[in-house]
Amino acid sequence: MTKTIRLALLASTMLGTAAWAEDVTLTVESWRNDDLAIWQDKIIPAFEAANPGIKINFAPSAPPEYNAVLNSKLDAGSAGDLITCRPFDASLELFKKGKLADLTDLAAMANFSDVAKSAWQTDDGKQTFCVPMASVIHGFIYNKNAFAELGLEPPKTEAEFFALLDKIKEDGTYIPMAMGTTDQWEAATMGYQNIGPNYWKGEEGRKALLAGTQKLTDEAWVAPFRQLAKWKDYLGDGFEAQTYPDSQNLFTLGRAAIYPAGSWEIGVFGPQIGGAFEMGAFPPPVPAEGDKCYISDHTDIGLGLNAATKHPEEARKFLEWVGSPEFAELYANALPGFFSLNSTPVEMQDPLAKEFVSWRQNCEPTIRSTYQILSRGTPNLENETWTASANVITGAETPEAAAERLQKGLASWYEPRQK
């Protein structure tokens, strides 16, 4: 009897150990350290509840260090199973090196359009290596309380925009716009790439630049620099030494009326403002009344599979879920300002996020002009555009000189693929 019980207990222990050993933990590499709580509280529990035996560990790095940290881990064989993918060339290079697996045959890829997948495909579009997760939209966030106090309405044209800035400046209560030039990417991303699509007509101009039928010295590409040069008078004293966090603080503390923005700020600003004032948003004003509007609706974040993972089956199961409508709704509402790329419509809950995404109904979307192919060489067009945008705002370069320098740098290594 005693022997029978011992054998039963031993068998039970062995079965329990075997069951425990079957649990697999997948590690997710990411630069989105701001999202740690959301992954731990919402995303991971939702997946694990429906997929017993698979555990998820979200392990982000600091955003500026992500590329270098990830490359080192991949080379050392210590990277996680799932890799958060930046758009276009950085991830494409990883795929070419065999670090990211081919996901073309993943069933969930049918849930995404060719445009959504384009940021994580080979140049010929035949292979896809990351599941699209979200895009970000550019525009302007404004302090609704300040606008009501000064009797202002969101501008629709460039002339209305500058008339509004003049009124805010003349009143003197608020800095018209919160943006600095110390962190040069801010001037390019929230400045040049924000307003630029209205001048180069979105995808039409971007693709013409790729094809070589347009140059950066053409009027469509110089004009946004000319507008940026005018911003100098509305950024407040000391903007030249102002960092990106400084700009965020000026707006969230209620000292600036307008913030040239990426939609990712929605989830950051809400808790910081804490109801002190209400936020609104308007798209980049068009050059003239009646002009078609364009917005930068930039494919920003995807998720790929480490080709060296020891758990490909479980990792692909997670990726199938990331490509599902269920994940799209969960992610977009957990992170307002990161908009689903899934073909299934997502009902947004955050009012400011709803405002941003509503622009898709009337404005033509495009992506940042420097991201696909044009920043593969030296000098790097993306980084050079950062410098040019900051220089134009401070007055260190004229719009024409900046455009000429960018075109010369691009032409030194890029041979357009004429069609």
Image (cartoon, grey):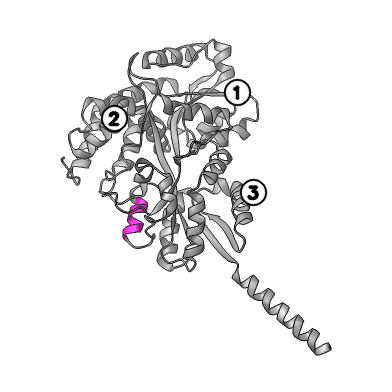
Instruction: Give above or below for 417 relative to 69.
Output: above
Horizontal and vertical percent position of residue 102: 37, 58
Is the residue under label 1 in contact with that under label 2 (CB below 8 Å)?
no
Q: Amino acid at mark 2?
A: Glu
Residue under label 2 = 397
- Quadrant position of the N terminus in the picture: bottom right
Label 3 neighbourhood size at 10 Å, few (<14), some (14-19), many (20+)?
Answer: few
Q: Amino acid at mark 1?
A: Glu
Report helix, strand or loop for mark 2. loop
Sequence-wise first label, 2 or 3: 3
Report helix, strand or loop for mark 1. loop
Give the camera-side residue of 39 and 169: 39
Horizontal and vertical percent position of residue 173: 55, 16
Label 2 neighbourhood size at 10 Å, few (<14), some (14-19), many (20+)?
Answer: some
| Quadrant of res 287 | top left
Residue under label 3 = 41
> Distance between the Cα atoms at labels 3 and 1?
27 Å
Q: At x 23% / y 36%, what residue is drawn?
A: 209
Give the camera-side residue of 380 and 275: 275
The magenta segment is 90-96
Residue under label 1 = 278
Q: Amino acid at mark 3?
A: Asp
Label 1 neighbourhood size at 10 Å, few (<14), some (14-19), many (20+)?
Answer: some
Q: Nearer the viewer, mark 2 or mark 1?
A: 1
